[in-house]
Structures are given as structure tokens and as C-alpha cells.
Amino acid sequence: MAEFVPVPSFDLVVFGASGDLALRKLFPSLFHRYKDGQIPDDSRIVGVARQVMTKDAFRQSVSEGFANLAKGDPSSPEFQAFLALIDYVALDATKADGPWDHLVQSLADGEDKVRVFYLSTPPSVFGGICAQLRDAGLVSPASRVVLEKPLGRDLMSAKAINDAVAEVFSEDRVYRIDHYLGKETVQNLLVLRFANALFEPVWSRAAIDHVQITVAETIGVGSRGDYYDKSGAMRDMVQNHLLQLLCLVAMEPPNSVDADAIRTEKIKVLQALVPIGPADIASHSVRGQYRAGLVEKEAVKGYLEDLGPDRTSSTETYVALKAEIANWRWSGVPFYLRTGKRLPSRRSEIVVTFRPPPHSLFGHGGEANQLVMRLQPDEGMEMWLQIKEPGPGGLRVKSVPLDLSYETAFTLRYPDAYERLLMDVVRGNLSLFMRKDEVESAWAWVDQVIAAWESAGTQPDPYAAGSDGPLQAALLMDRDGRKWRDLI
Ligand code: BG6
């Protein structure tokens, strides 16, 4: 049985409550925590959006979201009991005359409770909403704010948002979400590295040849084209999820699992990333954009058709990068990052390739050891070792994995990342959230890559949906005498 650390009773206000993220992830995650008995019955959840509708109509859309987007069963008695915690308030949160009094009423008598404001809205309104919350007298001593990504679109806008939010909430009350940090397997990276003495002596340039971090998706941009086209894979995935994974692989051991101890070590990695400027952009990066093709045997449209009729765009739906970290541990060890939409399989993994043996006793057939951390799906770990192929006739060496599947080892339902993160907000645990300077350091590195692309004036390379991405990405590895791990 999983153990659930109880949380105190709380009030949670979700801004952007009729949006895709709220219906697909936030409400279903809250339900699972409720069903497991972690959320006290006197907690209150208030959805806020501009659309005028009754509480019952909103509860109905939460039920439909649970059925259609989260593939759950809203008819269960537990779900119906969960719906009873939910209220709805229609208001324009960017305006002083919102009207705010209905929200004030829904939160009445809750000044002493933990109060969470979850901003699942475009980042351009984060600062404005915080100011309105303060002016409406809603920021109680136990209030905290959750900021959904993307946090801006570059360093300058991220700083402006951070400053505006800081006028209302001190840094220890700001929870910047990167949902990858809530994934079980991502948290396991910390445990793997720092609870097993085995890895630390070999976790450096002395024994590691290179690291690959892949987040491959089969989905296209779907109905998110308007947002995505202004963002692209670099801002949507690399700036946050991939750089966070890189930090967890590369960081020094923190002194404790305290939020600041962990975050300080991650920032050091981000600050040590070598800039990819105009001179390196062609050799260190690839941008791609998907065209029509076949994904998992289904014919799908290209990116431009997904955006709508007669659209043109130079936004990338695929990125591959060769990142380098200038410090004692990692100097000379490339970290290859790649992410893309409409790739042949959904797969997120980190592959650490060790150096080959210094001298080959057995002739051909020996390959370098690899540690593969499968983040999703089929969470687990493989340690690829060389063994003797059984049978007579000499010593033939073969690569085989020691394979740990979490599903087989632990027979638990895998909680969604948001379940863990939402409960951490209520508990006041900031370890899995990004600090202001962390987000800003990540933007500083990403900004100069984007600036180098812009000054080169090149277009993304096309790739067929269902392929491994542009050929140029394979060539990026090939130039270094290396290969991406297969996506299928
Ligand atoms: C989001 C991105 O942050 O992560 C999406 O905005 C992407 O474009 C998603 O599809 C991937 O998350 P997951 O958990 O499905 O790997």
C-alpha cells in the first residue's frame, strides 16, 4: 500500500478553470488525492473563469473532462462526493471590477486555512491577477501562488513576471511548476544517484562518454496551435523539462533534500552551460518541423495544416542540441538533448553511456555500458552490460540489459505528476518547484540559442511525421562518432 502523508484542510482557487490543463490534469489529480483520503472533507476548491455559468454547469464540465480527457468514471459515488467540494465563480481576474465579491464570499471564514491560488492562465496576466488578489483582500497569511509554465517567453518577460508576482508574494510562497519534476521516475533520479554509493565514483568525465536526454511525443499540436506557434519546442519543452532533467543528472550532491539545497545545485549546472552562439549554432543544434506522415499506422497532417488553412510558420516542433557543461565533473562530456512532436513513439528517457573498456580482450562485439532511465512510458531502468554469449566455440561477447520495470517491482497505480505537486503546494514543500533564479538562468541560456537561430535566418528542417526527426539530427551525432538510441 502506498502511504499518503495527510495534508491540512485547504482552499484552492484555480484561475483558468475551464481550460484544458485544469480539466485534463488538475481536477482529475485532485480527485485521485481525494479518493485516497488525502484531502480533508472541509477543503474547498473554487474554479474561476470568465465564462458565466452556474456551479452545476461547471461541475458538469469537470465530470466531462474527467470522462473524456482523463478517461475516468465520473458516475462513481467518490467522484460525486468530490464534486461537492467544487464551487465556481465567473470573473475577469485581470480587472479590478472582476467582480471579486463572489470569490471573496466563497472563501469566507477561511483566513486561517492554507489558501492556494493556481494560475493556469497565460503568463502575461500572472502579475495582474496577483495584484487584483491583493487589492481584493484575498491574500491571507497562509496564501501561496502556483505559476503554470510557460513563465514568459524569454529572460526579459520572465523577469518582469517574477518581479510583478514578488510585489504580492514573497519567494517562499511562489510555486513555479514544471510537471516533469512531479513524475515518479524523475524524482527517482535523485534517489538513484544519491542513495546508491555505486554511481558517484563513476558519475563524471572519468567514466562517462556522453549523456542523451530524449522526450519524444507522438502527438501533434492539436488544438494548441495558437499557443504553440508562438512558442515552439525550444520554449515549450527544452527551457523547462529537458533542462530540468539535465540538471538532475549533472548536479552535485546537495547537502540535504531541502528545497534550497537542491535548487542551488541545479542553478550551478544551468550557469555552467556553455553558450551556443552564432559560431556554434550550425554544429550544435537542429530545428525541425513535421510534415504529413504516418504515426503509429495512422495518417496525420503536417504542422502547417494543423495550424489551419493557408498558414506559414518557422516555428520548430523538433529540437536537437549538443549541450556542454563547463565544470570539473563534466568538461568534455556532451549532453545531447532532443525533443519533438509527431515522432514514432512516445518515449522519455535518459541514457548515460560509459566509456568503453580501455583495452579489448575479446575482439569485436563489446560495446560501452549504458544506463537507461526510462521516464515514460513503461517506467524503469536498464543497465546494459557485456556478457559471454552462452555456447561453445570461443568467447563471444554480447550486450544485455539488467532490466528493472517499476510496474513489475511495485504494483501501484502511478500517480500523475500533478497529484504529487498539488499536495506539495498545500504542504508547503518547495523542493520540486523552480526558484526565480533557476527559471531565469534557464531562459538566459535558451535565449542565446534562439537569438543565434534568428541571426542565422534559417528555417526548420522538415521531417515526416512518424520518422525519427530531421536527418540533420542524426548527422549531429554522426559528426561526433555517436548515435541516438532508437526511438522504437
Ligand atoms: C507540456 C508541453 O509542458 O508537456 C506540451 O506544453 C507537451 O507541449 C507536454 O505535450 C508533455 O508532457 P508529458 O507529461 O505528456 O510528457
Image (cartoon, grey):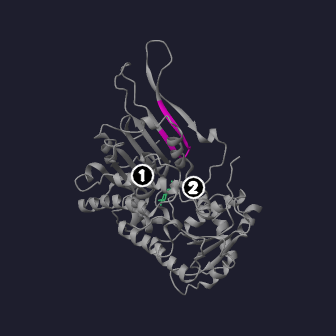
Q: Is mark 1 within 8 Å of ligand 1?
A: no
Determine if residue 135 is in view. Answer: yes
Segment colored magenta: 372-384
Residue 76 position in % (x across, y down): 75, 60
Residue at 71% x, 56% y is 36
**Is 137 displayed left or right of 239 in the figure?**
right
Residue at which label 2 appears: 417
Q: Residue furthest right?
A: 77
Residue 209 position in % (x across, y down): 36, 37
Residue 473 position in % (x across, y down): 34, 47
Residue at 46% x, 46% y is 253
| Image vertical order of residue 371 relative to residue 8, above or below | above
Question: How far apart are labels 1 and 2 at the CA level?
Answer: 19 Å
In this rendering, which labeled residue sits more in front, label 1 or label 2? 2
- Residue in the foreground of this view, choosing between 341 and 184: 184
Circle 2: residue type: Ala
Q: Is mark 2 within 8 Å of ligand 1?
A: yes
Q: Is mark 1 on a helix, strand or loop?
A: strand
Label whose residue precedes the other's in the sequence (1 or 2):
1
- Residue in the foreground of this view, choosing between 206 and 182: 206
